[in-house]
Image (tube, rainbow, N blue to C red):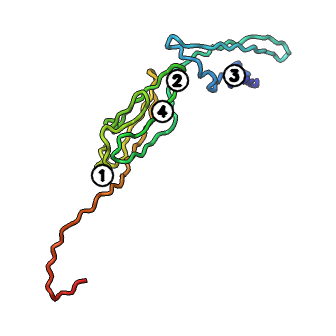
Amino acid sequence: EDDGVLTLEIGATLTVGGDGSYLFETNGAFQDLQDRDNGIGSSQLLIFDYTLEDPAGNEDIGQFFLTIDGANDAPEFDAAYAFDVEENQTVVGSDSASDVDTGDVVTYGLSGVDAGLFGIDSTTGEITFDVAPDFENPSDSDGNNAYQVTLEASDGRLTTTQDIVIAVTDEGENTAPEAQDFHITLDEDTEND
């Protein structure tokens, strides 16, 4: 009635319950299998020998056949992204994502309330402002210089998203001083400090 656990060299585990039930956990061991749904995918056949024994000591040996079919995995962002951009600059930065499925090409996009103010290179993930931002005159949806967009990474079938904030910082412009004309009229007997 005890459960038996078999751990494969590749890290997957097979747990066989005393009641005949089983649980197979891949633990990421088959990520290199390509998606069978695209017609060029792959699968892997695993064969396990097992022994059944009754209380009287009678045994029988059988085989357990398990076929693992490849599945499409969504791209994953390589980090959590947030950007601080000094005003009057158009380049925000780049995001990147990867896909464990061999041959899948990741493309990038943007959505969200402030996405219309930006461009993104669909191949490299580089994000740019369409027009350089002005800290003193924010153009984001809530006027606080915190532009809210959603990054998108797609392999053509699955898309992963990540909400980010692009914060525009004040450049601290050094404006030239402006002299003003002063007109003062004094009485000749007035003391002035």
Type of residue at label 4? Ser
* Pick the front one: 32 or 93: 93
- Determine the CA span between mark 2 and mark 4: 16 Å
**Residue 99 image point, x, y percent:** 52, 26
Q: Is residue 134 above or below residue 44?
A: below
Amino acid type assigned to the residue bearing label 1 in the image: Glu
The answer to whether residue 143 is above or below residue 3 is: below
Residue 95 drawn at (x, y percent)? 46, 35
Q: Give the residue displayed 30% in from the left and 40% down from the top.
A: 131
User: Disc 3 residue type?
Assistant: Leu
Disc number at residue 73? 2
Tell whether label 1 touches label 3 (CB within 8 Å). Answer: no
Residue assigned mark 1: 136
Residue in view at x 73 percent, y 11 percent: 63
Asked if residue 113 can be seen in this view, the reply is no
Single out the mark in the foreground, 3 or 2.
2
**Dot 4, crowdedness within 10 Å: few (<14), some or many (≥20)?**
many
Nearer the N terminus, badge 3 or badge 2? 3
